[in-house]
Structures are given as C-alpha cells and as structure tokens.
Image (tube, rainbow, N blue to C red):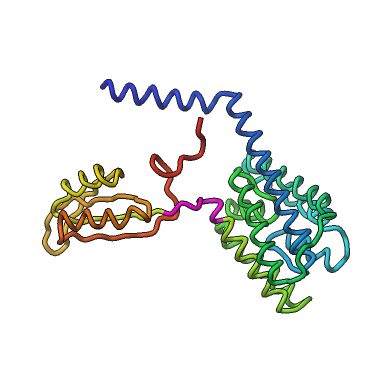
Amino acid sequence: MLEATTKLKLEVDVMDRLNRPEINQKLVVTDLLLIVTGSFLSAVAFNSLLIPNQLLSGGLGGVAVLFHYLSGWRTSVIYFVLNIPIFLLGMRYIGRRFITYSLVGAISFAVLLAVTRIFPAPIDDPLLGGILGGFLHGLGAGIVFRARGSPGGIDVIAVGIKKWRGYSLGQVTLAFNVLLMIIFGMIFNLTLAAYTLISMYITTRVIDAMETGLDEARSVTIVSAKADLISRLIIDQVHRGVTYLEGAGAYSGEHRQIILCVVNPTELPNLKDIVFRADNQAFIIVADVREVVGRGFKVEPFEY
C-alpha cells in the first residue's frame, strides 16, 4: 500500500512539473531554437550543394527548386508562396502545436534560403554535391523533426491527408517525390534525376538516424527450463532488466516462462555465453531493435 501511494505521488509530481508554465515556456523556446538551427543547415545544403549542382530535394523544397530552375525566381520566394495555401488548408485538419511549429519552420527556412544565397558553392560535382547536400539537409530536417516541428510543405500536406483519407505519411511523401522525380527527369536529364535520388535517400537515412538515435540494441527472447537461474545471472552479471512472458509448447503442452531482455550489441556475446552455460538446451532469438526508450538506454522526451 505504501509503495503504491509513493508511486502515485511520484507520478503526480512529474505531471505537475511538466505542466508548470516556466517549464513549458523553456521547452517551447528550446524547440524553436532547434527548428531555426535545423532550417539553417537545410538552407546551406540547398544553396551551397544542391542548387549549384542542378539537383533537387524531396518535398515542396524540391518543387521550389524546380520552379527556380525553370523561371529564375528566387527559391526562397517560391517556397514561401507555395506554403501559404498549404497552411491555410492545414489549419482545418492539423493540431495547433504542429501547425505553429511547422509555420515557424517554413518561415525560417524561407528566410534562411534568402540569407544563405551568398554562401559559396565549394563542390562542382553533382554526385559528391548530392551526397553531402543530402547529408546536411537530412541533418537539418532531422533536428527540426526532433523538435516536434517540420519545415512545412509536403509534411503538412501528408499529415492532413493522413487525417482526411487515412494514407500514411510515408505513402504520401513517396508518391509526391516519385512524381517530382519523373517531372524532373523529363525536363532535364535522367543522370541528374539519379543523383537526386541518391541525395534524397541519404537525406531519409539521416533523418531516420536523427529521429531514433544512433544507439543500437538487440531484443533477446530466451526459452529455457531454467528461466529463474538465467534471469538471475542476467541481472547480476549483464546488469540488464528481465521480463517474464508466459508461454506453452504447442507440441509438448508444457508451460514455461519465456525471458525477454534488451541489451547493447557489445553485451550480446556475454549474455549468450551466460545462457548456454546455464542451459545448453536453451533456445535464443535475437532481433534488431529500432529504438529503446527507458532506463539504461535513451531517456525521452524530457530530462529535468
């Protein structure tokens, strides 16, 4: 009873701290600074690496660059104008915080596109420019997404379509970018379109790494008649938590406790050695884990 009361008081205390105005304001300021920082990196990628090498990016930024190639108008102006109707429609379907953060991202990106036009273009090679530009743009966009915002454009459209028609964000973005690449390849040439695809792939991979973190982990499932012994050895020697799952053999009908544990890759060999020393008949399943949030791994979203 005392433990339950203590836990309840702790949960109430945590919620009270998260709801304090000064903490929320601090978080908002931090998010906005990250959005501007990420927008700056993406703007540099556009003006110093992608545009000088006649490449595109994905999303509405790519559309703005394509119009820039065709008309000579500034990319920043085109991007800003294209975002106006999108945000006007998005306000009807999308949450206030996301639309506000995305508006900040779109405006800061458009402004920084204009400011960074004076930056030099250090690389005169479409392939290398695409690789480095894709990496830098992915880094910038990843920072914006980590701040729970977006650069505007196709991201706002994708969220709206998801709520309206049920299509996933990935499906909307993929369809948009495929159509953009087809048009780009038809107007210019397939070589530049191929380089752009390489750049877009790198951007996507960097965004994924920024979103989930670079920490790798392995999920280990262990079936053994000596589950209690193995669990104690894992806790004492690997210093990782263990969870029991109830299981039964379909053929034998025997009920057993199945061990579930998450470890770092460097801890995996030691864990397997411990398991097979305790029970050489044990059955182990190891799977890659995309992200682990919690004690002993990554703590999110806030630390105070």
Residue 21 located left or right of residue 7 = right
Q: Residue at x 70, y 74 (%)?
A: 193
Residue 111 located left or right of residue 19 = right
Residue 162 located left or right of residue 3 = right
Quarter of the image for residue 253 reads bottom left
Task: Give, as a single range, the part of the protein colored magenta.
Answer: 208-216
Vertical comparison of 182 with 23: above or below:
below
Residue 214 highlighted magenta (yes or no): yes
Kindly give the residue lying farthest to the right in the view shown: 72
Location of the N terminus (image quadrant)? top left
Where is residue 206? Give x, y as percent: 58, 58
Where is residue 178? Give x, y as percent: 65, 70
Vertical comparison of 291 with 296: above or below:
below
Q: Residue at x 39, y 39 (%)?
A: 295
Vertical comparison of 279 with 128: above or below:
above
Quarter of the image for residue 216 reads bottom left
Residue 24 highlighted magenta (yes or no): no
Residue 278 located left or right of residue 34 = left
Q: Residue at x 63, y 70 (%)?
A: 198
Q: Residue at x 78, y 64 (%)?
A: 51
- Given residues 186 and 34, the one toward you in this image is 34
Where is residue 56? Give x, y as percent: 73, 66
- Given residues 291 and 88, the one toward you in this image is 291
Where is residue 126? Give x, y as percent: 73, 71
- Given residues 169 and 111, the one toward you in this image is 111
Number of labels in the image equals 0
